[in-house]
Amino acid sequence: MYRVFFSNIGYARGIDGTLLQHVKGFHRNFYTSRYHQEKVLSQVRDVIDCCHPDLCCFVEVDQGSWSSAYLNHLDHITDDDYPYMDAADKYGNASYLNYVPFHKGKSNGFLSKHDIDFRHLYLPYGSKRLIYKLHLPNDIALYFLHFSLNRRTRAKQFSYMNCLIKQEKRPTIVMADFNIFAGFKELETLTRGTDLEIMNDEDHHTFLFYNRELALDLCLCSRGLAQKADLDIIDQPFSDHQALLLTLDI
């Protein structure tokens, strides 16, 4: 068995998606105290310890910036169980956003129990451009990323990912915060001409904003992998997103 955990932790702001939390925690969109983040990251670590994944993939983590009181999130939660890690700016090395207040330090990254081959790839569209490509056991390719909030930009990003996946010579997994506010029909641009299957149930939400519930955090697998995989939705009381736990029988 090999387990992959995917989580949007919302920069450890501790806003759970309810209206009350958005109002009470509004100031954390600009600055979150180190004390508050450490409480949230302790909860993140508790969820990981319950799930026992081999690989933890994160979007919306901070590498240590003014708005996060210079707390590096992955450094804070890693330990001897997950000695291998990487984090990178989600906007791409060449983006001016890496130097703009409230954007600087905003990243994606991973923790792994085992040494793992990976690459940073970049979307040619949108502001959030980082794609992680990791080489899992049994010659499986895993892509994880965070798609645009803008529907037109997102469609271009899906088309680009479709081309990448069609060129892939190995079984493939895509895990992401897809931001598909119009539903699963948006994914047709990404899946067209591939054998990717959506592991999620569209009726099982992974995101909450006030009284709106949506399935945004998704896992797509090549057909052969999907037949020997299970996907669980994991509650995260510290975030407006729920996490994914993919268990592969490999």
Image: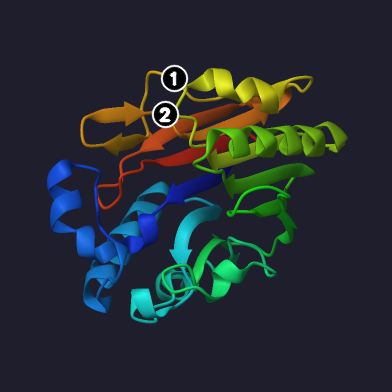
> Which of the pair 231/180 is nearer the observer?
180
> Is the residue under label 1 in contact with that under label 2 (CB below 8 Å)?
yes
What amino acid type should be assigned to the residue bearing mark 2?
Ala
Q: Residue at x 47, y 22 (%)?
A: 183
Numbered circles on residues, count: 2
Q: Secondary structure at mark 1?
A: loop
Q: CA distance from mark 2 to mark 1?
A: 6 Å
Q: Is residue 83 visible?
A: no
Residue, x 19% and y 58% (percent of image)?
A: 25
* Residue beneath disc 1: 202
Q: Residue at x 77, y 34 (%)?
A: 171
Question: Would you say 84 lies left or right of 21 here?
Answer: right
Q: Relative to residue 5, is residue 90 depicted above or below? A: below
128 in relation to 38, above or below: above
Counting from the top left corner in percent of width and height, residue 22 is at 20, 50
Q: Which residue is mark 2?
A: 215
Colour scheme shown: rainbow
In the rendered image of this protein, does residue 72 appear above or below residue 208? below
Q: Which comes sooner in the sequence, label 2 or label 1?
A: 1
